[in-house]
Image: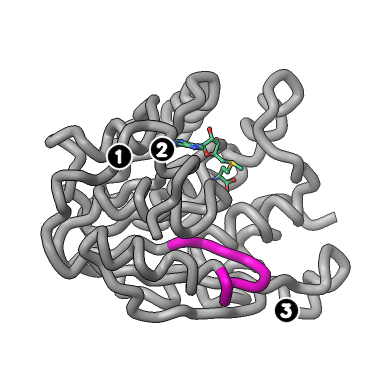
């Protein structure tokens, strides 16, 4: 059987992403920590090796095909859970200052273990709610890029995420399935938040023959939202409100 390292290297190569030996072993260690810790703490429903590579590691980093990462100095992942998509992006771009934010404290302990074992620096693990940190001057409008996967509907999520983004920076929402209605509903809120939807990119991951045995391929959409102007003082509203009463 092919070693885990060889599989990771070849699969990323197939997508045109060339990993150094260090990066390959970081992904392999991340996989071990994820599945070991998952036995005692609920981190992910996906544990089969090839599927983790596909749906967590590769899915997290495919954004690099759609966005120019050379100018990104700071990135925040809102509702990162077990580190997706922020941690795989950090592995690819160790020079980016990365903040991983989540409201569940036990996930932070896991992420700290990953940071220690992978020898990563310039990475902050922050425990708390997005709505609270979006009002904190140390975080508000401080990032070039904010990413988020599987956290909330786009209206709510825009209020969680866009407050972190500088004018000219982007919030990229990872979505799947049909997003037309979600996009339409989120439109007025995105405007109130001083932002604009710039583009939507849809692609099918897992389309290569090698991976057909894992899955038939699924659609991933990236919604690119740019901050056009400074954020109004009213936003984000108090914790809980953006989910209960999404902006309209
Ligand atoms: C379904 S998980 C997704 C985790 C990860 N992004 C992924 O795609 O695998 C949603 C995560 O968002 C976090 N979350 C939900 N609402 C949040 C909020 N208002 N502020 C910070 N984190 C939040 C939860 O604690 C949870 O870890």
Closest to the camera, between mark 1 and mark 3, is 1
Q: Nearer the viewer, residue 157 or 124?
A: 157
Q: Is mark 2 within 8 Å of ligand 1?
A: no
How many marks do you count on the picture? 3
Residue 18 visible in rendering: no
Name the quadrant of the N terminus.
Answer: bottom right
**Residues at circles 2 and 1 in contact by the CB criterion of under 8 Å:** yes
**31 sits to left or right of 76:** right
Look at the image and give the residue range highlighted in magenta: 173-181
Q: CA distance from mark 2 to mark 1?
A: 6 Å
Which residue shows up at 20% across the image and 39% down it? Answer: 139
Give the quarter of the image for residue 115: top left
| Dot 3 or dot 2, earlier in sequence | 3
Which residue shows up at 71% across the image and 33% down it? Answer: 35
Residue 66 picture location, percent across and down: 42, 77
In the rendered structure, find residue 241 and report the number of the disc placed on it.
2
Give the quarter of the image for residue 216: bottom right
Q: Is mark 1 within 8 Å of ligand 1?
A: no
Tell me, what colour scheme is on the image? Answer: one colour
Name the quadrant of the C terminus.
Answer: bottom left
| Dot 1 or dot 3, earlier in sequence | 3
Q: Which residue is mark 3?
A: 207
Q: Nearer the viewer, residue 99 or 33?
A: 99
Q: Which residue is mark 1?
A: 237
Residue 104 visible in rendering: yes
Q: CA distance from mark 3 to mark 2?
A: 39 Å
Q: SS for tag 3?
A: loop
Which residue shows up at 25% across the image and 49% down it? Answer: 163
Residue 18 picture location, percent across and down: 49, 69
Residue 225 picture location, percent across and down: 34, 68
Q: Is residue 197 above or below residue 46?
A: below
Closest to the camera, between mark 3 and mark 2, is 2
């Amino acid at each position: 059987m092919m070693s885990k390292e060889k599989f990771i290297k070849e699969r990323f190569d197939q997508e045109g992403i060339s990993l150094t030996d260090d990066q390959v072993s970081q992904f392999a260690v991340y996989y071990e920590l994820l599945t070991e810790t998952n036995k005692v703490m609920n981190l992910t429903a996906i544990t089969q090796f090839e599927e983790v590579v596909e749906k967590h590691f590769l899915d997290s980093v495919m954004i690099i095909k759609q966005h120019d990462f050379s100018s990104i100095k700071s990135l925040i992942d809102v509702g990162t859970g077990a580190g997706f998509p922020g941690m795989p992006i950090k592995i690819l771009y160790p020079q980016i200052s990365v903040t991983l934010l989540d409201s569940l404290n036990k996930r932070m302990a896991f992420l700290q273990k990953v940071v220690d074992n992978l020898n990563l620096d310039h990475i902050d693990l922050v425990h708390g709610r997005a709505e609270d940190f979006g009002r904190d001057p140390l975080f508000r409008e401080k990032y070039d890029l904010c990413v988020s996967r599987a956290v909330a509907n786009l209206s709510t999520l825009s209020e969680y995420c866009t407050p972190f983004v500088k004018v000219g920076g982007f919030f990229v929402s990872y979505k799947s399935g049909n997003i037309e209605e979600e996009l339409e509903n989120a439109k007025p809120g995105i405007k109130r938040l001083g932002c604009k939807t710039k583009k939507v990119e849809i692609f099918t991951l897992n389309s290569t023959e090698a991976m057909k045995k894992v899955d038939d391929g699924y659609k991933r959409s990236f919604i690119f939202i740019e901050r056009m102007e400074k954020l109004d003082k009213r936003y984000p509203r108090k914790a809980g409100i953006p989910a209960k009463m999404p902006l309209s």
